[in-house]
Amino acid sequence: MIRAAALFVLLPLAACTTTPEVAGLPDMSGCGDTKVANLIGKHWTEALRAPTQKRAGTQNLRVIAPGDAVTMDYRPDRLNIETDADGRVARLKCG
């Protein structure tokens, strides 16, 4: 019984600990969507592909227009650029 009580007291404290970040490691948490957020609202052309990939730091880029068929596979390193009916960038997301 005492062990169960100790568990209920100590478990919430364990949730408050943080893990240290290791300096010098590259950011592997996404596809670079935040690095190219200034594209939202701009007209997408294929001439933007190479500079966008370079700035985002990804080799995987997919442009999705309204009505395009897309696969549902999730690739965290892939930058998806969704355009509206006018060809303007409406949304950026990883996957």
Image (cartoon, rainbow, N blue to C red):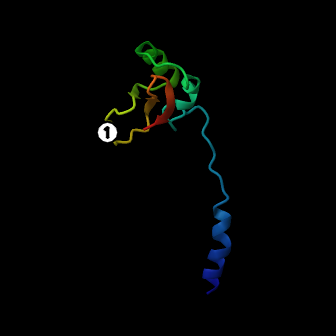
Q: Does 67 appear above or below 17? A: above
Q: Does 73 appear above or below 90? A: below
Residue at 54 percent of width and 34 percent of height? 27
Q: Quadrant of the C terminus?
A: top left
Residue at 43 percent of width and 18 percent of height? 49
Judge by depth and name the residue closer to the eye, 95 or 40.
40
In the rendered view, does 25 fall on the left or right side of 94?
Answer: right
Residue 90 % position (x, y): 51, 30
Residue at 31 percent of width and 39 percent of height? 71
Farthest front residue in view:
85
Does any portion of residue 45 appear in the rendered image?
yes
Judge by depth and name the residue closer to the eye, 43 or 70.
43
Residue 7 % position (x, y): 62, 75
- Callout 1 amino acid: Thr
Element on which disc 1 rests: loop
Residue under numbered circle 1: 71
Residue at 55 percent of width and 33 percent of height? 25
